[in-house]
Image: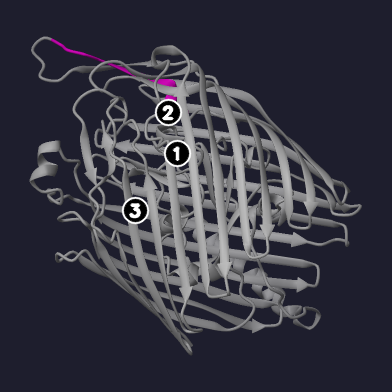
Amino acid sequence: MIKKRFVLTILSSSLLCSFAYANEASVTELESVTVTATRLPETISDRNISQVQTVSSEELERRGFSTIGEVLKHTTGASIAGSGTWATGVDLRGQGEDQFGMNPSVRVMVDGVPVSVNKSHGSVNLDSIIGIDEIERIEVLPGGGAVQYGSGTRGGAVNIVTKGYTKDKLSVATQFQSFGHGQNGGSLTIDGAKKIFDGLALGVNAALKNEDGYREFVKDREARINTKAFIKFNENNRLNLGYGYFKGKYNGYDSLTAEQVTENRRQNTPHATEIIRRHRANADFTSDISDNWQLTANVNWRNEETPGSWSNFADEIITVNAGAKFKYGNQSYITGGLVHENHQGDTTYVSGSVAEVNKKANAVWLMNHHRFNPLFSLTTGARYERTKYAYNYKVNTEGDSNNYAFEITPKFHYSDDGNVYGRFVRGFTTPNPAQFRGTKSTMVAGSPRPMQTYFTVDLKPATFNTFEIGGEHHFGNHQINWALFHTDTKDDIVQIGDAHGASYYENIDKTRRYGLELGAKQKIADKVSLYENLYLTQAKRHSGEKNGEKVPYVSKIKATAGVDVAWTERFNTFADLTYYSKAKDNTGGDTKAYALVDLGAKYHWNKLTLTGGIHNVFNKKYFAFQGNATGQGGGNTAYDPADGRSFYVRLKYDF
């Protein structure tokens, strides 16, 4: 199946490129191409709709970020939850354990396409999909996206927007890292583009990585290539094609006991090599049929395979979007679209049995932004989505649900770049089909292991209501953003039970989250740039067996601050501080508060850029994850030590 789709992708790309060449006389110079979520620029990055935090490619380059996780850690409220042995996810607004469970509550996308998989969790390594050099910008919408993207946006949305190419380009970058005790490694990246003729440009980004981890016997070996074709048939019609392939080989690690951590936090046992293969392809068409009308259409496909010693996992997602935008009046417009998403996950066990998970969603959404006058605007939107579920392993379950989202945002514009707004959002999170199966373990006389029995669970989609007020203010070279939010989730989907007894999911009446987001930036004499972010949140269950419990892995306080000093036009230094207060783990224990300091410097000379620095300067000992690795609570607490101090050097040359 993979080979068939790959061949079809290549054939369609060749035919379209031939068509563009045949019409060379009628096409014009390529303009700057930016691929955005559902290919409607205002869909996610329009500040009229939501307060958006944007990290540009210039900032990515200036600060020397090497991973997407590093970038997100320095935005207001965002954090990376979980660990590699269980699950990881991008967290916004205190989703905690809910974020890296089966129903991620933050919609993470690359060019508007979701990157989560239909496994038993929402884990995904963003850096295996996209390279830093390919990124045009990263957009973070705390609490936003329910109307545009549907399920899984309670915490908000993150969209990684890739670059478009308009002229010849070639750069080569190599990076070396070391933990200072023999655990070393590096990577090589090639980023290039070629303008074939007016109306056609090709781009490629390829990377190889071979790195040792902080823990003993941990090794990451990765190969990735992403290719693109940018076709402009005429001034009003454009087509982008893309194909990407990734292969990763990993030697992982085991969680440690408290005694093992004290003895040697880097200890590990040799692991078999885990392999991940991923193919993805996309086709995106945009047509400006008039000054007021724009039509878009895109198709995306991704297939991921993870063969293992006890099971083989395959995940496939196909998304189809059709959208339109109509401009009317002064700074007013209506935008909307149709969405189809088909997500299939299969796990084949050693015994030969197969667990099949399928989830299909069809949706229609519409949003209107109306600027009544220079002082007041109103944005309203609605979405209807029908979802079908199917799960087949030990028990067979099928079902469907009708879901809707709604939002309204009145905004007062007291200046060209200052505003105060209020917002109400009603959204939903649909269950993962695997959550409809419960398990029960019973001991059988004469057997050393308990016998597993299975049953079906009746689950409803969770719904949430968010009330928010906030603002954005500019005073010369100073900028302040703030937001107060209150989110109540009804029928929240949580896991009940213990690994050695009954384990199942159920809807609980209510989970409540509320908090404050505060961010500030200053620029002094064009030489010194400062930023400060403060995030306060509280998240608790309000019914059922977990009534009164705090949502695991939600720190009450997250604070970040940083400074960037441009000593000369060629040389700058930067420093970052990140602080997390303690939180509850999934056994009811407390995690430890910790603060991290990172230092770096960058030197640019002609076409050569040299960046270097130290992560975790003071070698702070903390945990990427602690708790019960099954995610079900109870039992002994396990620990995954986080990385200690590391050094890195990156050399990039632009030809």
Of marks 2 and 1, which one's residue comes earlier in the chain?
1
Q: Return the residue at label 2.
A: 434
Q: CA distance from mark 2 to mark 1?
A: 9 Å
- Residue farthest top in this picture: 445
Label 2 environment density (alpha carbons within 10 Å; few <14, some 14–19, many ≥20): many
Which disc, if any, is residue 276? 3
Label 3 environment density (alpha carbons within 10 Å; few <14, some 14–19, many ≥20): some
Label 1 environment density (alpha carbons within 10 Å; few <14, some 14–19, many ≥20): many
| Label 2–label 1 contact, CB within 8 A | yes
Q: Nearer the viewer, residue 117 or 260?
A: 260
Magenta residue span: 433-444
Magenta span includes 442: yes
User: Position of 46 compared to 261: left or right?
Assistant: right
Is 342 drawn above or below residue 462 in the view shown? Answer: below
Q: Is residue 155 visible?
A: no
Say which amino acid is labelled 1: Asn
User: Position of 421 compared to 436: left or right?
Assistant: right
Q: Secondary structure at mark 3?
A: strand
Of marks 2 and 3, which one's residue comes earlier in the chain?
3
Q: Return the residue at label 1.
A: 118
Q: CA distance from mark 3 to mark 1?
A: 15 Å
Is 464 drawn above or below residue 339 in the view shown? Answer: above
How far from the left and from the top, in percent, is residue 511?
50, 23
How far from the left and from the top, in percent, is residue 39?
68, 56
Q: Nearer the viewer, residue 588 or 362?
A: 588
What's the residue at 15%, 56% (across, down)? 217
